[in-house]
Amino acid sequence: MQTTLILLKPDTVERSLIGKVIARLENKWLKIVWLKMMQLDDSIIEEHYDFLADKPFFPSIKSYMKRTPVVALAVTGQNAIATVRTLTGATNPAEALPGSIRGDFGLTIDGNIIHASDSEENAKIELNRFFKWENIFDYTKIIDIVL
């Protein structure tokens, strides 16, 4: 089992797509073990996007990510990282396949709906950035019993 981070970005919140995106995750039998809505501040944005800090477009990313609250989720499942990355689709919605979250809901590369950890190493770092592990829930879903 893997656990990974997902951020539903401001355009997801503004366009009332939270439920639709979460439904996609649950339909793939991913288990939500933590969920919160939070307003990001400069420090967490700078830490999360430190690899982009020297880019000329970084101020617009900060502005975008502070525009509204985001929804942070920790989800777990078999091959959760790869599953979520496939569901998410290409970073640029214009290149994302139909049926993917960005392919169906994304409008621009600047507002691309969702962030998903890209590796186990980054998932651990990102989960620690947004969550306290004692707050992560462990429970059994009916599908866990059936399988």
Image: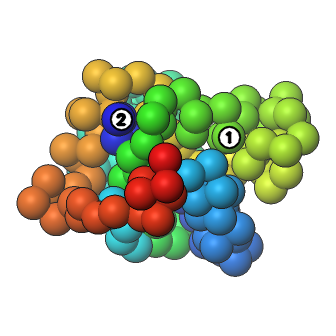
Image point (65%, 57%), residue name: 27
Task: Name the foreground residue: 63 vs 14.
Answer: 14
Kind of element beneath mark 1: helix
Q: Is residue 123 visible?
A: yes
Measured as percent of width and height from the top left, residue 64 is found at 56, 56
Q: Indicate whether 57 appears above or below 107.
A: above
Left or right side of 47 for 146: right
- Amino acid under disc 1: Leu
- Image quadrant in which you'd find residue 108: top right
Left or right side of 123 for 117: right
Residue hosting label 1 = 87
* Few, some or many residues within 10 Å of mark 1 (<14, 14–19, 20+): many
Image point (57%, 39%), residue name: 84
Quote the CA–CA distance across marks 2 and 1: 16 Å
Image point (43%, 42%), residue name: 77
Residue hosting label 2 = 2
Measured as percent of width and height from the top left, residue 94 is found at 87, 35
Image point (85%, 44%), residue name: 99
**Nearer the observer, disc 2 or disc 1?**
2
Task: Name the foreground residue: 82 vs 88.
Answer: 82
Q: Indicate whether 19 appears above or below 40.
A: below
The number of numbered badges drawn on the structure is 2
Residue at the extreme left of the image, as rendered:
134
Kind of element beneath mark 2: strand
- Amino acid under disc 2: Gln
Circle nearer the N terminus (2, 1): 2
